[in-house]
Image (cartoon, rainbow, N blue to C red):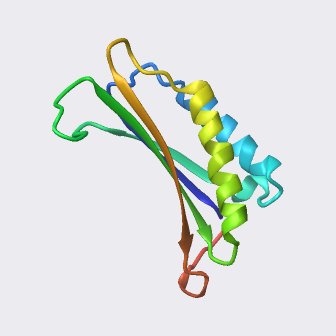
Amino acid sequence: MPHLTLEYTDNLSALPLRPLLHALNQRLIASGQFSGPDIKSRALPLTQYLVGDQDDGQAFVHLRLALLDGRDDAVKLALSTALLQILQQQVTAPDGCALQLCVEVCDIHRASYAKHSS
């Protein structure tokens, strides 16, 4: 735990995915909340999307951090703020394209989460 899912519009083709995932994972480790091997990150391009009613000229990155429940709101806010800073540093919009960056922290119900490692 945690699970980090980066969804991005496919018009962000120059997105530095591997360095971005490394930077996000490093920030999570630096928070002191997680150890490296527990963090599972992935990036998913979105080929079908719509922002408002605009068919083009729009891009977004939505980062979801899923954590086992039990952390207080202050910790979650610190994590989302830190991850948003990484996005702001590393994600740029193509010319003529508006960009939205967002981070969501959500809880995974601890009592029903199952995991196996070997």
Closer to the camera, 82 or 3?
82
> Which residue is at the far top?
95
- Residue depicted at 60% across the width and 74% down the height: 115
Position of 53 relative to 65 (above/below): above
Total labels drawn: 0
Q: Quadrant of the N terminus?
A: bottom right
Closer to the camera, 60 or 109?
60
* Residue 118 seen anywhere in this rendered image of the structure: no
Q: Quadrant of the C terminus?
A: bottom right
- Residue depicted at 21% across the width and 25% down the height: 56
- Residue depicted at 71% across the width and 59% down the height: 38
Q: Is residue 57 left or right of residue 8?
A: left
Position of 52 relative to 76 (above/below): above
Give the image location of residue 31, x and y in percent: 79, 52
Give the image location of residue 46, x and y in percent: 31, 39
* Residue 74 seen anywhere in this rendered image of the structure: yes
Give the image location of residue 77, x and y in percent: 65, 57
Position of 77 relative to 25 (above/below): below
> Which residue is at the far bottom?
111
Question: Residue 94's image quarter?
Answer: top left
Give the image location of residue 34, x and y in percent: 77, 59
